[in-house]
Amino acid sequence: MSELIVEGLRANAAGEAILHGVDVQVAAGEVHAVMGPNGCGKSTLAHVLAGRHGYTVTAGRALLDGRDLLALSPFERAKAGLFLAMQYPTEVPGVNLLDVLGASLRAAGRAPAADDLGAVLSSEAERLGVPAALLERAVNVDLSGGEQKRGEALQLAVLRPRIAVLDEIDSGLDVDALRAVARRIEEATTEGLGVLAITHYTRLLGVLRADRVHIMIRGRIVASGGPELADELERTGYERWDRPAPAEVAVKLGRSF
């Protein structure tokens, strides 16, 4: 059974400390949601796990099925079974989705015949409500936010990773699109997918049921619980958890301990 283990993860961006010791474990078939205010480090966590350039890990570890992700290149992390659905998907002019998925599957040693891949892609596109015409267009070029997010979900469904990190997969989606994307991701969990879903809003969790909810404040997971934690957050906001530590207060007051 696949498992992502993140322990004591600390990371900097542009010389500034962003993650201050993140701990989270996601097993196959589970959905974990990470929620927090803007600037708390949620997307940084996703980028560090995927190996995006510009981030420096200063402590901690991230393991996928016992393998050290932090020692691998982004390509190797993807090949090991990690998938990132980006908050702002990258445009790839001149390359369509069929080409991208074919190349990805060949690199992973799972290349199907062209006709078989086309059939799978068409079937998954229909399930997600992706128009067939979009499959022939350049990846993410001149697409709406909703079309891009459906495309990310389509790639996930075809590539069948072990662990998927979803960075605000719900942004830009209308109600029908959100339901289609969340339903397909949830179906993938029954096939063994583990999900780490980063989101601002509980509306995603209304259709993609979370086993665990984590609240991130200032680069740390400050609370974890069941789905009821998201309901509490909806009622009260982040104020209960978003309080500076005594040391931070002392710095602001010009004092030291």
Image (cartoon, rainbow, N blue to C red):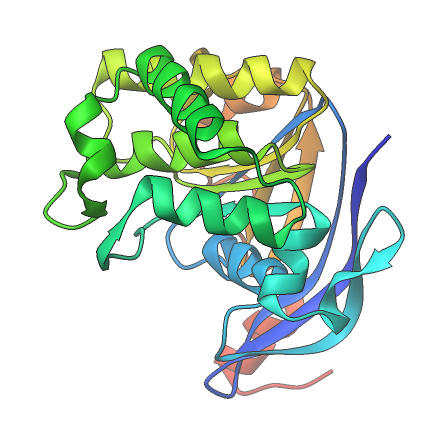
Name of the residue lying farthest toward the left = 142
The relative height of residue 215 versus residue 104 in the rendered view (above or below) is above
Q: Nearer the viewer, residue 232 or 221?
A: 221
- For the point 56% across and 44% down, the residue is 105
The part of the image, by quadrant, that contains residue 60 is: bottom right
- For the point 64% across and 19% down, the residue is 189
Left or right side of 245 for 129: left
- For the point 48% across and 51% down, the residue is 103
Let me know if residue 237 appears in the view: no
Left or right side of 223 for 48: left
Number of dots carrying numbers: 0
- For the point 66% across and 46% down, the residue is 222
Q: Nearer the viewer, residue 38 or 192?
A: 192
The part of the image, by quadrant, that contains residue 155 is: top left
Residue 70 image position (x, y, % from top left): 73, 68
Residue 91 image position (x, y, % from top left): 24, 57
The part of the image, by quadrant, that contains residue 220 is: bottom right
Residue 89 image position (x, y, % from top left): 31, 51
Let me know if residue 186 appears in the view: yes
Residue 203 image position (x, y, % from top left): 37, 19
The relative height of residue 231 versus residue 198 in the rendered view (above or below) is above
Q: Nearer the viewer, residue 198 or 152?
A: 152
The image quadrant where one finds the N terminus is: top right
